[in-house]
Image: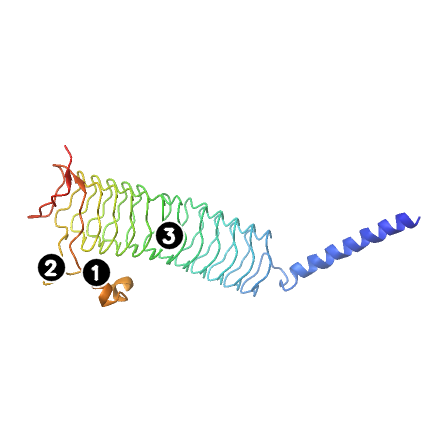
Amino acid sequence: MENKLAKWSRALWFALLGILLGFGACSGLPRGCPSDCLGVDLRGRDLSGFDLRAARLLEANLQNAKLEGANLAGAQLQGANLNSVNLRSANLEHAQLVGADLRKANLGQANLTNANFTGALLQGANLGSAQMQGVVLDSADLTGAQVNGLDLTHAQLNGVLLTSANLQAVNLSGTTLGGLGFSRADLGGALLEGSTLPATWFNLASMKAARLRGAILNGSVLYGADLSGADLQQAQLRGVILVGARLGGADLRGADLRGAILNYDPATFDLRDARNDPEILRLPASQRALYNRSAALSGVRYDRSTRWPVGFVPPRDATLAQ
């Protein structure tokens, strides 16, 4: 009898403990939340694994909250404070995050399919291994964000700011983008084949071994960019600024560089609209002097179909491919 009583007591204790823990986990949630969590303060709360599908979290404060593995499919998070939130492996499919603050948020391995981040702040955010099909990032700020290795071929990225972002091996092939800023971004090994990126800032960017075959970069500014070993075959580079750029070992076969600015002339050099690039404005004069030099073309490959600026003579150590 004592044995049965002891077992029953333990079972009752664990049941009560579960209830208390469950109550503690939900304490602070207002009545009706979810689904109506409008403006609710959930700072630092542990909501990992919670089912918040279609929840109304507009302007909610979720700073430093833990939402790892949470289901936020279709949730309304417009204007929400998600600064430093942990959304790793969360489901945000079709979620609305227009104007949300996601600075330093962890979105690694999250499902962001068809999510809307228009105008969102994503500086320093981690999006590593996230599912990005159909994601809308128009006018979003991804300065310093970790976006490396992602497939963004079906994403909307008009006007997005990617300054200093980690975009290594990112796939942007065949995309048409406008108004982007890639200054100081790391695009090493990125796939940009056939992409249309006119009048884009790539100032001081690292584009080593990037694949830009057939890309359209007419009018872009690549001041001080590192294009060592990049594949620029058949790329359209008309009117681009390459002063201070490094193109050692780059492949320029069939590239169109008519009107490009390759040589530095202090009397006539003009960065055009890129003079307003914050990365240029904050560049110390001592460092600026290091980039004010003609493009380094040592070891580039070109052929007879490569079109150079009028009067430009390729360096002797460039390779004319037959």
Q: Amino acid at mark 1?
A: Leu
The quadrant in which the C terminus is found is top left
Q: Tell which of 32 and 219 is nearer to you.
A: 219
136 in relation to 286, above or below? above
Q: Which mark is residue 265?
A: 2
Q: Position of residue 56 (x, y in %)?
A: 54, 58
Secondary structure beneath label 2: loop
In this picture, residue 39 sits left or right of residue 16: left
Q: N-terminal of the two: label 2 or label 3?
A: 3
Q: From this viewpoint, which residue is outermost toward the top? A: 322
Q: Amino acid at mark 3?
A: Asn
Report crowding for label 2: few under 14, some 14 to 19, many 20 or more residues within 10 A (C-alpha): few
Mark sitting on residue 20: none
Residue 295 on image: x %, y %: 17, 52
Which label sits in the foreground, 1 or 2?
Answer: 1
Q: Which residue is mark 1?
A: 290
Could you tell which of marks 1 and 2 lies nearer the N-terminus? 2
For image coordinates 28% across by 64% down, the residue present is 278
Residue 69 located left or right of residue 182: right
Q: Nearer the viewer, residue 114 or 250?
A: 250
In this view, the residue farthest toward the right is 1
Sequence-earlier tag: 3 or 1: 3
Q: CA distance from mark 2 to mark 3?
A: 32 Å
C-alpha gap between disc 1 and disc 2: 14 Å
Residue flagged by tag 2: what amino acid is it?
Asp
User: Residue beneath label 3, please?
Assistant: 166
**What is the CA distance from the residue labelled 3 to the residue labelled 1?**
24 Å
Q: Is 2 displayed left or right of 215 in the figure?
A: right
